[in-house]
Amino acid sequence: MRLTLKIAITVLLGVALIFSVYSYYSIQRERQLLKKNLSREARHLGESLRFMVAEIWEQRGADEAIGFLSRANQGYEQVLVRWVWIDGEPPPKFQPRVPVDQLDDLLEEETVALLAGSPDGRDFLLTYLPLLTIGGRIGAIELSESMDEMHDYVQESLRRSAMVVGAMVVSSLLLVGGLGSFWINKPMRRLRDQAERIGTGDFETSLNLSGTDELAELADTIERMRGQLAEAREAEQTANTAKLETLEKLRHTERLATLGKLSAGIAHELGTPLNVIAGRAKLIGSAGLEPEDITRSAKIVGEQADRMTGIIRQLLSFARRGEARKQQVELNAVLRGVLPLLEPSTRERRIELKLTESAQPLNVNADPGQLQQVLLNLALNGIQAMPEGGILELICSTPAGIEVPDKIVDEGQLWCCLQVRDQGSGIDPEDLSHIFDPFFTTKEIGQGTGLGLSIAYGIIEEHEGWISVESTLGEGSCFSVYLPHSSHGAET
Amino acid sequence: MEAVCLDTHPHILLAEDDDALRELLDFALTRAGYLVSCCTNGLELMEKLAAGDVYDLVISDLRMPALTGLEVLESQLDNPQRPPFICMTAFGDRQTHDIARRFGAAITIDKPFDLDEMIELAHVTSLRNQPQARPLRSRV
């Protein structure tokens, strides 16, 4: 409605201005015409009077002629006739109403007509007709006519114009209000409602504005937009579903890959001792073996069985995850426990494992399986970052001057730190802030799901610690796992 | 006596990083009448092969520190005097077998394997496949 009003008022102002200018010029013209008419009448009258005055002046003298003019006033109501002297020093009675220098033309014996105002603010049309008296002195007949009538006329014209403009404004406002509401406001409201509906995600309701005007076109456009948005949303939903499916597949792949790695690990770790046990058993069973060889073989069988038991224990502790089962754990032992699991991968890539244990045993309250999983994840990432080989360092320490992140409650406790340092390709600074995001991976498709680091992060968070990372492109990365030191360490 | 042994017994070069398995194979093969030299990683194996001694057979693990069995095998591809190779692997997937065969391995055997089967394979593959086992066994 406000827009309609603005347009209406602008148009009305324009129309009113044009009408006012037109009225002004019409009135001016009429006024000119009126003045001309009055002037002509006055001149006719004056000329008749001048003729008669000249006659009387000649026959009966000046006094009689001037007396005639005074008497003539009684015959004309609107026109006042006087005798004036132009030259000499006439008494006030015979002075023209305007200064003599405005009446120079009279000396040329020409009639002068001019407008003059009286001291009380009224306008007069003055007409002077020159008359050369017998004495040679120049006088004139002055006819003064009040312009009041003309003023009244102009006032009337102005009033009418104003009334027309006023009526036009009022009727236009009413019309604009009514029609604007019908033509603009109603469809605008519907358009706005539709836009709001679309904004809140309702793409179902359709909008149909009849007509062919711009609003109908806009409605059509909004309709098309609604269709496109609905399609886009549908496409997005489809894509989302597809993405979820892909993620599910990836997780499945991850599980399969883990299973595959685990199987390969089991095959390698258990295959060799099994081989030794079977071979030794065969040797013991064969004829002609010396007693000390039999004893030695039996001892080796026992050792290999122990070795297998150890491997199976490790596998079980790795597999037994989910809810953290916290207990007192010594970090150096955890670090040592990870080494055998890493050996197949490091051997394959010619990577040297370097273990730096802390001088003192470091006890934390943690789930050993989960801790091992975290270290494995970090170490395997380090190994993957070094395809050309290098040194993978596992460090256990209690560093001083740690910057504790804001979200961690720091009660001044001792922090234990497990570091995994590689000499690999390093992490791009842009990627550094994303590496703990779930599914973020820089590896090629099928090489990793991007879950490993996020799982590690989650596990350490659950242990009231945090993981930080420093990395230099081309030089390597260092992941630090911080865990609160357990004060009940002496028990274990 | 040693010199005679060198001459008469086929010489096997054994490469295995696992101490227990290496010792077992060494013992069993020696008992079966072979002269066995041992090494614990791929680099050592390579050095021994390059040293110029003549071997009748190489038995090597595929996954070893320093150099893998496959890499050693590959390095011997253009050696005309190359002894036959028996490869042992715990990752007995088809691909590993194929690669080993392509690199000239006579046989690839998956762990765990039967000890007798290994000795039988050594007999079949060794350049001199008639070791004088009897006297040695009777000696043991």
Image: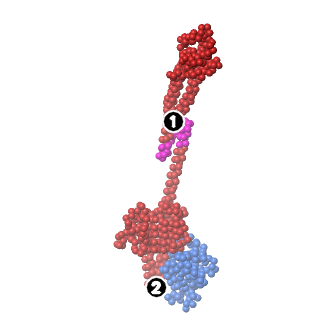
Chain colours: A red, B blue
The 10 Å Cα crowd at callout 2, few under 14, some 14 to 19, many 20 or more, is some
Which percent across, then down, holds residue A422?
50, 70
Which badge, 2 or 1, comes first in the chain's sequence?
1
Which percent across, then down, holds residue A373?
45, 67
Q: Which residue is mark 1?
A: A6
For residue A457, above or below residue B52: above
The residue positioned 57% from the left and 75% from the top of the image is B70
User: Share a chain, discs 2 and 1?
Assistant: yes
A440 falls in the magenta region = no
* Chain of the residue displaying label 2: A
The 10 Å Cα crowd at callout 1, few under 14, some 14 to 19, many 20 or more, is few
Circle nearer the viewer, 2 or 1 = 1
Q: Nearer the viewer, residue B137 or A49?
A: A49
Q: Amino acid at mark 1?
A: Lys
**Residue B135 visible in the displayed image:** yes
The residue positioned 49% from the left and 88% from the top of the image is B140
SS at mark 2 in the image = helix
Label of residue A125 in the image: none
* Chain of the residue displaying label 1: A
Q: Which residue is mark 2?
A: A293
* C-alpha distance separating marks 2 and 1: 112 Å
Q: Amino acid at mark 2?
A: Asp
The residue positioned 41% from the left and 61% from the top of the image is A407
Which quadrant would residue A126 be assigned to in this image? top right
- Per the rendered image, the range of residues in magenta is A195-223
For residue B7, above or below residue A429: below
Which percent across, then down, holds residue A315?
44, 70
SS at mark 1 in the image = helix
Is residue A427 left or right of A309 when viewed as pictured?
right
Spot the residue most to the top: A59
Which quadrant would residue A359 be assigned to in this image? bottom left
